Image (spheres, rainbow, N blue to C red):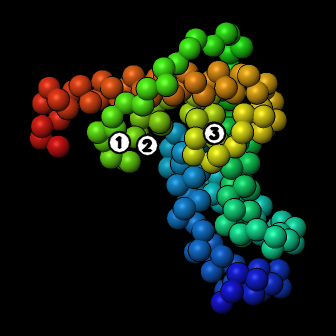
Amino acid sequence: MSTQQLVKDCLRGKPEAQRQLYALFAESMLGLCYRYTKSINDAEDVLQDGFVKVYTSLHQYKSDGPLGAWVRRIMVNTALNFLKKNKKYRDEMYFSEQPLHPVADDNPVLDMDAKELASLIRQLPQGYQTIFNLHAVEGYSHVEIGEMLGISDGTSRSQYARARALLISWIENHSFEIKKGKYAGK
């Protein structure tokens, strides 16, 4: 079934089409939601809320771009709203306006798999993690991130640079520990 037909059938309220739409995007969107939250349960809540918004807003999809990109945008916005509304995340979403310290342009040799890197990203403070995901993973500009989070684009840049510097430090330590044999059994 084509994407256009799937959308039409969903708009007609056909349960099978809604199940197909969910099956088509649920796995990748759960991964997206999990990048912004600290638990799989919270990610599943965001996913559920996101799909409710997808189904109720589907009439706004204009077929001028991929359906997956449109669904992704809704999921990102749903995740950000979840972070803003949920006290345990909101309290960690502190954005400092302090001046930025320069960060080296050096890229560390990445001697880890994607799962390990994702784990490191999840260990970032919530504000850093959110901005890092929005910029490095989702591809939003700092101006867009500032508008989404109600911060200046300079603050977004600063928080991204700090997240990146922290990740580089952790990756360099990780590589050093591998060389020393700490992870020899892995």
* Residue 46, placed above or below residue 18: above
Q: Is residue 82 visible?
A: no
Mark 2: amino acid = Ala
Q: Secondary structure at mark 1?
A: helix
Q: Nearer the viewer, residue 137 or 38?
A: 137
Query: Mark 3: few, some, or many residues within 10 Å (few <14, many ≥20)?
Result: some
Q: Is residue 59 left or right of residue 181?
A: right
Q: Which residue does the numbered mark 2 point to in the structure image?
A: 118
Determine the residue positioned at 68% across, 38% down.
83
Measured Cα–Cα span from mark 1 to mark 3:
19 Å
Badge 2, how many Cα within 10 Å: few under 14, some, many 20+?
A: few
Mark 1: give few (<14), some (14-19) or many (20+) Cα within 10 Å: few
Whether pointer 1 and pointer 2 mark residues with C-beta atoms closer than 8 Å, the reply is yes
Q: What residue appears at the point 69 percent right and 27 percent down from the top-left corner?
A: 156
Would residue 182 be found to the left or right of residue 115 on screen?
left
| Residue type (three-letter) at the residue carrying disc 1 | Glu
Whichever of labels 2 and 3 marks the residue nearer the N terminus, that label is: 2
Sequence-wise first label, 1 or 3:
1
Q: Measure the C-alpha gap from mark 2 to mark 3.
A: 15 Å
Q: CB atoms at circles 1 and 3 under 8 Å apart?
A: no
Q: Secondary structure at mark 3?
A: helix
Tell which of 23 and 142 is nearer to you.
142
- Does residue 102 sit above or below 78 in this rendering? above
Q: Residue furthest front?
A: 105
Q: Is residue 16 visible?
A: yes
- Residue type, mark 3 in image: His
Task: Judge depth for marks 1 and 3 and give the one in front.
Answer: 3
Please give the label number shown on residue 116: 1
Provide residue 186's location: percent of width, then percent of height: 17, 43
The reply, left or right, for residue 103 in relation to residue 153 is left
Look at 81% across and 70% down and name the residue there: 64
